[in-house]
Image (tube, helix red, strand yellow):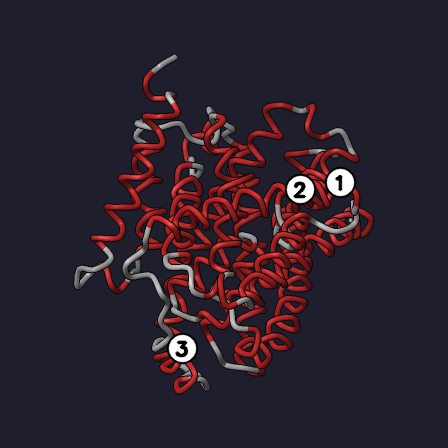
Amino acid sequence: MSFVSNPIYVLGVLSFMVILSIYAGKTKLGKQFGAALLVILFTAVVANLRLIPSASNSIGLYSVIFNYIAPISIFYLLLNVNLNSIRKAGLPMISLFILGSIATTLGILISWVVFSPETVLGKDAKVIAGMLTGTYTGGSVNFNAVALEYGFQKKGVLYAGTIAVDNVVTALWILVTLILPVFLSRIWKSKIAITRNNAQKTTFSNKGMDLASLAWLVFLGITSFYISDVLAHYLPNIPSILILTTIGIALAQTEFIANLKGSHDLGLYLVYLFLAVIGAYCEFGAVYQLKEIGVTLLLFTSLAVLLHGLITLFIGGILYRDWQMIAIVSQANIGGGASAIALAENFNRNELILPAILVGTLGNALGTYLGFFVIYVL
């Protein structure tokens, strides 16, 4: 095993990228970007320099972070959730998310007309369009659900290339949604300046994390994840992340859990670790190696996501003009619940954490249906 693929070495590099991003995010220039954006950028550079594995030579550690660390990070962040704080955010988030899902579908269909990917990809183009619609509504679960139905996962190079393009576009959209609210608020002033300022005053009991709190948090995170995984086998129609979310919300309402120190920082650190892997997966070389197919996939996907963004921003701006919330919802569509939560944390919109998770779960429910709908239409 090459040292570059050694999981301990890679975990060390990812951890250092998080540290570097946290300190860089405190500088005058870094504050304009935030640690969440910086950790993606730094890790993408390291991965593309081949100092750590990327999408084409992914290692088991990345799967562990995606499958275990990301959900548990959501659980820890939920331990600070006050149910009263999300009542006003719930309905706008859901309506915007449905709008974003429709925008994704329209984006794919319009991009199909513009680029005619079937001329390069043949019959596979329709399946890819359905897969991308699914993943940009809900996530990888929907992506693979559509792929499995048509046996697309057996087409090794094309399947891997589609994943590579998906990862590149997703990472780029995270960067866009982190930056865009700052510029849009200057052009078209947000309606929620007072609400946002109030949200920034939210504090958590992170200082003085003691050994007992750490021990309880580790136990609760692992145990709750296991329970949610077991229950998901008996309740196959309910995603395990929704069960884990429910457990986290319920625990957060108890005085004992509310008094535990450090859950917010621990959850945020794990989110940054997840974003570091997102950055590592941003592999431009893999797209280039596919040549014409890769370029077609990248253009087709990029335009679809861009159209999703434009439609969501325009209509969302007219209805709500809360650019941060709109960006979070769009990220819940394109990147999924974990990256949407990272945006909520980066914007200090803690009242939007739970709604981001809930709409992400809604996306898992809608994505596969919309994916098959696109294939049927095309």
Q: Are marks 2 and 3 in contact (CB under 8 Å)?
A: no
Where does label 1 land, which residue?
233
Q: What is the three-letter code of the residue carrying label 2?
A: Asp
Q: Which residue is mark 2?
A: 229
Viewer-proximal residue, 254 or 371? 254
Q: Position of residue 332 (x, y in %)?
A: 56, 59
Tell me the residue at 51%/35% (across/down).
164
Q: Mark 3 sits on what residue? A: 199
Query: Is residue 303 at least partly visible in the picture?
Result: no
Give the foreground label among 3 and 1.
1
Q: Name the spot of residue 357 as percent of width and height, x first.
A: 58, 60
Secondary structure at badge 3 equals helix
Image quadrant holding the N terminus, namely top left
Q: Which residue is drawn at the image coordinates 30% and 59% (left, top)?
A: 34
The spot of residue 193 in percent (x, y) is: 39, 84
Q: Are the residues at dot 1 and dot 2 in contact (C-beta closer than 8 Å)?
A: yes
Q: In 3D space, how far apart are the residues under numbered discs 2 and 3 (Cα atoms)?
A: 33 Å
CA–CA distance between discs 1 and 2? 7 Å
Residue at the far top: name it.
1
Q: Pick whichever of labels 2 and 3 is earlier in the sequence.
A: 3
- First-in-chain label (3 vs 1): 3
> Measured along the vertical axis of the image, is residue 46 above or below residue 301?
above
Q: Amino acid at mark 1?
A: His
Q: CA distance from mark 3 to mark 1?
A: 38 Å
